[in-house]
Every structure is written in C-alpha cells, then in structure tokens.
Image (cartoon, rainbow, N blue to C red):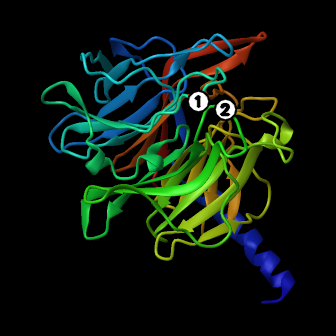
Amino acid sequence: MRPQSLKTFLALGALLSAAALQAATPPRWQKVRQHGDVPPPVWEAGVAFARTDGQPDTVYRFGGQRGAFPAEFTVKDFYALDLDTATWTRLTSPQTPSPRANPLLIPGPCAGCVSVLGGRGVFDGVDRTFSEMLTYRETSGRWARVPSESVGDPFAIRRSAGAIVEVPNANDPPQKTYYAFGGLGNTLFTPDGLRNDVALYDRETGWRIIKTFGTRPVPRAWTAGVYDPARNSILIFGGYRLTSEGGAFGPDTFENDLWSLSLDTLTWTRLHPQGPLPSPRDNPTLFFDTAHGWLVLFGGQGFDRVPNDLWYYSVAENRWTQVALPSTARVPRGRVGGTSFVRETRKAFELYIHSGARPEGGKTVLLNDLWKLTWPKH
C-alpha cells in the first residue's frame, strides 16, 4: 500500500471508530448512593470481583492506607459490596491478614472464596513487602494462610502495586488463570525494587515466574493490564518507573507506553499507536470492551496533575481516541490509588470507581465515593 493510501486508510479508520462511539448511546457517569457499612476514606487498597451463579454480585475490598507520606499508615479493613443494592458489609475475623497497602486480590481459588497475595507496608527505609497468600471463605467467614506447597514460588507473589489479569481457561471457561505483571519488589525504591517479570497462577501448580520473549517493558509499578480475548493477549499500559538516573520522582517517572504480551508465544511487543496519546501516568484504570475491541482508560496520576479523562484504544486501528463528554456531565474527580472493577451486562460494561486520594490545596484528600460508568455495547 502506498504511503498516502495508508494515511488515508488510517484516517478513515479513526473516523469510523469515533463514529461508532457517537452512534451508540454515549457513555455516562453516575454517582452511586452507598448503604450499610460504608468504608471510611482510604487509598491503595486491593479489590476482587466475585460472581457466583444465583448469588449477588459481590466485590471484596481489603487493606489500603490512610494519611500521606511520611505520616501514612496501612490498614487491614475488609469489606464486601453487594453491587445489586450498593450495600457494604464490614467483615471481621480473628485471622484477618496483617495491615498492608497495594495487595493483589483474586477471586477463588475455591468457590465462594477470595485471596490476598503480596502487598506492602509503609515506606520507612525498611523492606516491608509480603510474600504470602491468604484465602477467605464466605461459608465460614474465616481466613487461612495458603500452604507453601500450594502457593508455589513465594518470590512470584512478593510484590505490590502490580497488574493482575484474569484469563478464562480455554478448555474450561469458568476456570480462570491469573497473570501478575510488574509491581514493587521491595519498599526501598532501589533500582532492583521495581519488577517487569510475569507470574502465572493456576490451581495445579500455584504461582510461578514464566519466561517471556522479546524486549520487555521497563520495570514499573502502579501499572494496569487487561485481557484481549480476540488476540489471546494481555495489554499493559503506563505505570511508574525510576528516572533514567535511578531517581525516585520526576517528569520521566510516568509512562504512557502500551505493550502486548501474546499468550500463545509469550512474546512482548511494544505498540506504537497513531495520533494523540493519553498523557504519561501511573494508577490508570482499564477495562477491555470486547464488543468493539477497545481498551478503555480512565484517569490516573501524572507528574503534575491527576486527570479524570476518558480514552479508548482501538486494537484493530492502533489508535487512541479521547472521549468528549457533554460539558454538563457529572464526572468523578481524578484520583490516585483508587479501586476499580467491571461488571458486564447484556447491554453494557459497568466500570465502578471507589476510594482513592487527590491533592487539594496542598494537602492529600482521601475519598470514599462510588461512581459507575455505563459504557454501552451498541
């Protein structure tokens, strides 16, 4: 294809993609009224969404921190949210895991269970990273540490603030495989403290580091990933990294790069989207729109701002598009360290945003609001 024809093709693709969104019912944010034991404001908690046939759609949230550096402290609060009624229930147990921030949570591995793995303590010059996995059972209301022989490689889960991606088992879709990418390997901010490896979990082998091929993303934390079922790949966007000189904070410690990991070949490919890009950021919120083949992005934290913008990336067209909402639309405030989860319905994807922190007037303000983005399929 001649260069001019290629440019015309890409431009037409972008127009068709934007037209598809405009032709559909537009996305809409809605603030959700919460009931029950509404959690106090917190940031950098972990969350898992468990769906069980015939049971309420339940979201579990564990841990997090309150306050801001250097006076922050971690918590071990554990809550369940019934999405159908927006009702929170505080769950207590004498076996509750110790306080931690940025833990990774997964549904399972048993029915009616949720598991916490990894996480970190505060940044006080001592390495306070966890390398354990604990499981909560709904039926008993009790936590139990997963035995080492079932955990697998403890180094695989010695991380916090990484991306966790759920992938259906090709031969048994109700069964899930989980991938963890990147994260903090220690709380010292040393050059080897950030990770860019991939860990795999299944019920037969536990957690293990898997070998990948090609050039990997630079080590990073506070990144996010999603699964693209049409291409059997994981997409990773953005995150926090050290500066080129090894510094801990600066304009170049935030990324807006996009990577694809093929699960067929375990090969990394850096994608180079056409047109405008979202600004560099960590703590992005992502989900994958399987109806259109789009990666949807909300917010995050940049070097000098905390945006609340909304974008989508068309995999087929290799292009980002910013979503322009009406000027009168209610939109959640930008935030860092919030929790998010997605529920798919027959007509739409529902992205929920809860908690987090944001700078206001030179102070860190913690949040406990709940918002829902309805993202139509048609």
**Relative to 261, residue 306 above or below:** above
The residue located at (18%, 24%) in the rendering is 141
**Which image quadrant: the N terminus?**
bottom right
Marks 2 and 1, how far apart at CA:
6 Å
Instruction: Say if 248 sits above or below 72 in the image.
Output: below
Number of numbered labels in the structure image = 2
Q: Is 195 located above or below residue 318 in the figure? A: above
SS state under label 2: loop
Seen at 78% across and 11% down, the residue is 362
**Label whose residue precedes the other's in the sequence (2 or 1):** 1
Which residue corresponds to mark 2?
188
Q: Residue at x 68, y 68 (%)?
A: 215
- Report the side of 155 relative to 18 (left or right): left
Which one is nearer the viewer's eye here, 375 or 266? 266
Residue 303 screen position, x and y as percent: 80, 33
Dots 2, 1 in contact, CB < 8 A: yes
Left or right: where 154 falls relative to 109: right
- Mark 1: few, some, or many residues within 10 Å (few <14, many ≥20)? some
Q: Is residue 47 visible?
A: yes
Where residue 146 appears, x then y in whole percent?
A: 27, 40
| Three-letter code for the amino acid on which mark 2 is drawn | Leu
- Identify residue for label 1: 127
Q: Residue furthest bottom?
A: 1
Whether residue 86 can be seen here: no
Which one is nearer the viewer's eye here, 327 or 145? 145
Compared across the picture, whether 188 is left or right of 102 comes to right
- Viewer-proximal residue, 102 or 21? 102
